[in-house]
Structures are given as structure tokens and as C-alpha cells.
Image: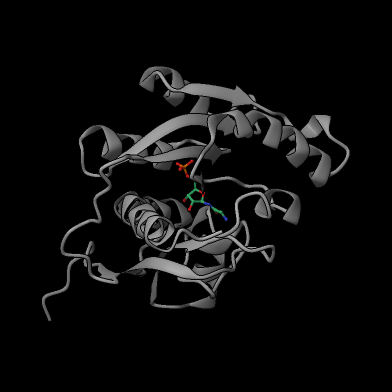
Amino acid sequence: MNYTENKCLISPHIDRIPRFSKPLKLGVLASGKGSNFKALVAASRNSYLDADISLLVVNNPECEAIRRAEELNISCTCLDHRNFSSRELYEIELLKILKPFALEGLVMAGWMRIVTSTLIEEYPNRIINIHPSLLPSFKGAHSINQAIRAGVKITGCTVHLVRADIDSGPILIQASIPILETDTKKSLLARIQVEEHKILPLGVAIAGKYWRELRVE
Ligand code: GAR
């Protein structure tokens, strides 16, 4: 068998990414390195994805995503969750930051916070999440280790619309990759992220087409 490490299946297969004469106006939420945020901005700047990434909000003042936003010259606000006594109070403050931008959609690009109906109801069907597993398998913050421990031979990543239950909601697009016998958490994450950076712009475009065509509420 001709077997290569990076052999990957993306489904649905998309010949041509949906185009938008008026770019999708998006905000991004991130908690970590910000590599998916960077990939999304790159896709918008190289005219692959018709999107205007208006702002980044992070919840962690030490996260690398802040530096990425500076490098990319994108407005970044840090709203530290540790200053709030509940998720709802946190999200009320988050909405005050987001609302003036009149966003069409919100992309959780490595946002390691559970979101509640306070946020979700303000953006019905308009919040997108990327997760490093083939959902509905391996939800939560430890999906890579869970996949390795479970001994599954294939894993991947998923872009989906957000619902109140963690890592649930309609799936927009997935990419699968093999788990190699030599894989560690680090090596597997690195290979999954190569695919995440491909499917996040595609997932956003699929959602954008749905928003524009159906004028969903
Ligand atoms: C990504 O792998 C993303 O799938 C994951 O966090 C990472 C962020 O990386 N998200 C989750 O686990 C959400 N449940 P990045 O900061 O380099 O984009």
C-alpha cells in the first residue's frame, strides 16, 4: 500500500470555495497560540476567503495570539475570564466588546472556554468552532490524548456551528488523518493543525454561504 503520513481526507469535498462580493465580517476568539487565527487572516488577505477579520478577543493575557494580532495589525482585546465570577457575566462584557463591530459571525479559533446561551443567543447559528478530533468523538480539552489512549487509528479535526453543549452542533466540514504508531501528543497535534488551517477557512465559507443565502436568524 502506498501510505504517506499526511494522507488526509477532507469532507465535504469543495471544488471552489464559496465567494462573497461583500466580505464576511468576522470576529475571532482565541486562547492559545493563535495559529488558526493566523491561518484565517492569511486566507482573507490572500483573497482565498472573502472575509474581513475585524477583531480578535482573547481571554488570557499571556497567550501568543495577542502577539499574532499585533504582527497582523488586527485590533485585539484581552478580556481575562479570571476577573469574572460567572460565565454569564463574562459573556455580557464580551458582548459589549463585540456588538459595535456588527459582526456576521464569530469564529472560536482555539477558544478554550465553554460558552453559554448568553453569547450563543446573540449569534444564532453564527458561531463557528474548530476542534481537534472527528466529532462527536473526543470532546473537550484533551481530545488528542483521548484519541491516542483509545487506540483509534484515524482522527482529525472538525469545524462546526456552536450549540450550548460542549463541542456539539451541526458539522460543517471535517478532515481525517491516520494516527501513526510513533505519534506523541505533540506530533499528532502538529499534523492535525496542518489540516485545521485548511478546513477552517472552508468551514467559515460554508457557514457564510448559509448565512447569506438563507438570511438565517
Ligand atoms: C486548535 O488545535 C483547536 O482545534 C483547539 O485548540 C487549538 C488552538 O490552536 N481547540 C479546542 O480544543 C477547542 N475544544 P491555535 O491557538 O494554534 O489556533
Picture coordinates of residue 25, whole percent (x, y): 43, 38
Q: Quadrant of the N terminus?
A: bottom left
Picture coordinates of residue 154, whole percent (x, y): 37, 75
Q: In the rendered view, does 7 fall on the left or right side of 86?
A: left
Query: Is residue 186 depicted above or below 160 in this figure?
Result: above
The residue that appears at 58% across and 31% down in the rendered structure is 57
Query: Is residue 115 depicted above or below 48 in this figure?
Result: below
In the depicted view, which residue is nearer to us: 63 or 201?
201
Picture coordinates of residue 163, whole percent (x, y): 63, 63
Q: In the rendered view, does 114 fall on the left or right side of 204?
A: right
Q: In the rendered view, does 166 fall on the left or right side of 159?
A: right
Q: In the rendered view, does 29 fall on the left or right side of 91?
A: left
Query: Is residue 52 depicted above or below 197 in this figure?
Result: above
Q: Quadrant of residue 167?
A: bottom right
Q: Quadrant of the C terminus?
A: bottom right
In the depicted view, which residue is nearer to us: 202 or 192?
202
The residue that appears at 66% across and 54% down in the rendered structure is 120
Q: Quadrant of residue 214?
A: bottom left
Picture coordinates of residue 118, whole percent (x, y): 75, 50
In the depicted view, which residue is nearer to us: 180 or 88?
88
Q: Quadrant of residue 205?
A: bottom left
The residue that appears at 23% across and 64% down in the rendered structure is 5
| Residue sitting farthest toward the bottom | 1
